Image: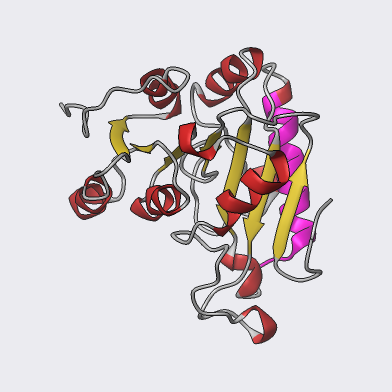
Amino acid sequence: MALIDQLGLWCEISAADCAGRAAVFLDRDGVIIEDTGYLHRARDLRLLPGAAGAIGRCNRLGIPIVLVTNQSGIGRGYYGWSDFTALQAALAAALAKEGAHVDAVFACAFHGEAKDAYRVADHAWRKPNPGMIVAAGERMGLDLPRSWIVGDRAGDLAAGRAAGLEGGVLVGAAHGEGERAEALALAGGRFKVCEAPALAQALGLIDLGRAPAATAAPRN
């Protein structure tokens, strides 16, 4: 399955059976691969250090890995779904070389400043809205209340909170203290927020759903 609305919503599930399992949801750019801004050329793809190894460990433990990515570059006309498909194929190949894979990919091209039919303000699938996560939960039978999300922006974690996940981990420090403060402010109720320098350390914090209750990891 690919475009489920023939326009701006992408859904591709490769896992055979994830029913009842807690998953790890991952943003793509800045979490798995380098964020170069509207990345769409396969030759520009660069895996972040340790990302494939971390995903591979989850694969071996039977933890579903679900990629959820905003793709406003498509809606803005910077590139097309064929470019997205080629880049995803390159990502899959790069992960496979290190014994890793993602179990599903969800993407949303709609944006309030996009062109023509892609111009949809506050679309339910576009993070920080929870639509992609909720759709994954429904289509894959995932245990969302025990699932986590890892992202490099507060909006990623906000989507996780809105979807009823157990918690989220903010990775990287490229977006400054404002982004960090916004992410940490999402902690509350049953939703936990942690920090890590990169995906490998983030998945160590989650530790198969046994993440610490603390809201923040110390920074050097």
Residue 33 visible (yes or no) = no
Q: Nearer the viewer, residue 19 or 69?
A: 19
Numbered marks: total = 0
Image point (77%, 29%), residue name: 17
Q: Is residue 187 left or right of residue 1?
A: left
- Is residue 81 something that shows in the picture? yes
- Which residue occupies 49% across, 47% down? 35
Residue 177 position, x and y percent, is 18, 49
Q: Quadrant of residue 2?
A: bottom right
Residue 175 in the image: state x and y as whole percent.
30, 50
The residue shown at (17%, 26%) is: 218
Identify which residue is drawn at 20% across, 55% down.
178
Quarter-wise, where is residue 189 in the image? top left
Is 73 displayed left or right of 13 in the figure?
left
Q: Nearer the viewer, residue 188 or 114?
A: 188
Q: Is residue 128 magenta?
A: no
Quarter that holds the C terminus: top left
Image: 109 above or below 191: below
In reply to whether residue 90 is colored magenta, the answer given is: yes
Dominant secondary structure of the residues highlighted in magenta in the image:
helix
18 is higher (above) or lower (below) than 117 = above
Query: Which is nearer the eye, 121 or 165?
Result: 165
Residue 39 on image: x %, y % = 59, 54
Give the residues in magenta: 79-95
Locate residue 78 relative to residue 167 in the image: left or right.
right
The residue lying toward the viewer, choosing from 74 and 34, is 74
